Structure formats: structure tokens, C-alpha cells
């Protein structure tokens, strides 16, 4: 059965604090591409629509999430002192702060976005399963997943990643992310 693949670009900023010697300890940004590959779980409607679901239906919520929530978000470790700054001095910007348990590496983001897209696919009742998710951080660095291990499923990057809404953290009430 043919796989369906689509890509979306977003800009982001992050910093990594677990490795104090890392160049990434200073806030910086990337222009990233997230590429999603879906595998149909239902038969194609041959002779009629000739697909299991349209590109428009498949991409609508996911691209909306990427455009409204991921694009220009600042990705932070929940233990990063910068998070306290935003909470105290710029709480109106918390909807632009993506948080993770641990450093916001591309590897961690792939796991969190895999789980977010699974939640969206289930909520939309789309007849597809996520086969592959890749994030190109730079033209020379890409992180690719073809499924999540038991450890990756057990890790809790934040409850936001398992909800089919536009949330990127658990700092704001759920209705904020509708």
C-alpha cells in the first residue's frame, strides 16, 4: 500500500543545559523541517476517491499545530531557570515556550512530536498509522524515528505531547490550547 509523506518547516530556539560544556548552552535557533510518513490502515477506495484519506484531511490539524504552536517556539528543559523568568516576567509568552523533561534535543522532540501526532491521528479517526517522523535540525543533521521503544513510551516529556490539542507545555490550562 502506498505511504503518504508530507513536510512542514518551522523556526525554533532552544538551549541545552545538562551538558555545561555544550555550545548549545547558549540560546540559539534553527530553521527545521519535520517530515511525516503515514501508512494507511484501511484499504484505498479504488475506482472512487483512490485514497484512504485526502492530503487536505491528513495535513490540516498537523500543519495547524506546527504553524500555530511549534513555529517560533522557545524550547526549554523544565529545570531551565529561563522558564522561571518567563513565568514571572512574561507569562503572556508561555504559549510560545515548549517544555520537556530534560533538554530539548532534536531526539527528545522527535519522541514528543511522534506522540502528539499519534494523538491527533486517533482524535481525527484517520485510517493511518505513523510510520516515520524525521526532524532536520540543520542541512547536515536529521533525527529519524520509525517507531517508539518501550523506554520512549514510558518517558514523560510532558502531558502535552499525548493530547490532540495545540499545547506545547503543561504550564497553561488546557482550554488555552484549543
Image (cartoon, helix red, strand yellow):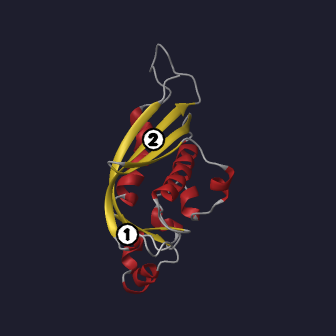
Label 1: few (<14), some (14–19) or many (≥20) C-alpha neighbours in 10 Å: few
Which residue appears at 49% of the width and 24% of the height?
2
The dot on residue 34 is none
What kind of element bears circle 2?
strand
Total number of numbered labels? 2
Disc 1 versus disc 2: nearer the observer = 1
Label 2: few (<14), some (14–19) or many (≥20) C-alpha neighbours in 10 Å: many
Percent across and percent down for residue 168 are 47, 63
Give the left or right position of residue 72, taking residue 84 as reference: left
The front one of 138 and 45 is 138
Name which quarter of the figure residue 50 lies in: top left
Give the left or right position of residue 113, taking residue 153 as reference: left
Mark 1 vs mark 2, CA separation in Å:
29 Å
In the rendered image, the residue lying farthest to the bottom is: 88
Circle 2 residue: 36
Q: Relative to residue 15, is residue 124 depicted above or below? A: above
In the rendered image, the residue lying farthest to the top is: 47
Q: Relative to residue 23, is residue 111 depicted above or below? A: above
Circle 1 residue: 23
Which residue appears at 63% of the width and 60% of the height?
155
Name which quarter of the figure residue 156 lies in: bottom right
Percent across and percent down for residue 28 are 32, 68
Amino acid at each position: 500500500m502506498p505511504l503518504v509523506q508530507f513536510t512542514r518547516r518551522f523556526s525554533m530556539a532552544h538551549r541545552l543545559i545538562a551538558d555545561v560544556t555544550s555550545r548549545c548552552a547558549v540560546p540559539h535557533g534553527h530553521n527545521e523541517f519535520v517530515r511525516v510518513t503515514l501508512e494507511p490502515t484501511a484499504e484505498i477506495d479504488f475506482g472512487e476517491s483512490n485514497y484512504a484519506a485526502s492530503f487536505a484531511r491528513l495535513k490540516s490539524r498537523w500543519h495547524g499545530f506546527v504553524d500555530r504552536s511549534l513555529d517560533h517556539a522557545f524550547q526549554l528543559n523544565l529545570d531551565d531557570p529561563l522558564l522561571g523568568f518567563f513565568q514571572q516576567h512574561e507569562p503572556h509568552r508561555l504559549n510560545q515556550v515548549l517544555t520537556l523533561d530534560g533538554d530539548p534535543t532534536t531526539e527528545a522532540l522527535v519522541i514528543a512530536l511522534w506522540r502528539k501526532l499519534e494523538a491527533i491521528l486517533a482524535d481525527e479517526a484517520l485510517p493511518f498509522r505513523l510510520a516515520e517522523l524525521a526532524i532536520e535540525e540543520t542541512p547536515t543533521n536529521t533525527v529519524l524515528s520509525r517507531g517508539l521503544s518501550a523506554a520512549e513510551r514510558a518517558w514523560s516529556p510532558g502531558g502535552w505531547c499525548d493530547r490532540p490539542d495545540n499545547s506545547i507545555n503543561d504550564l497553561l490550562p488546557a482550554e488555552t490550547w484549543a
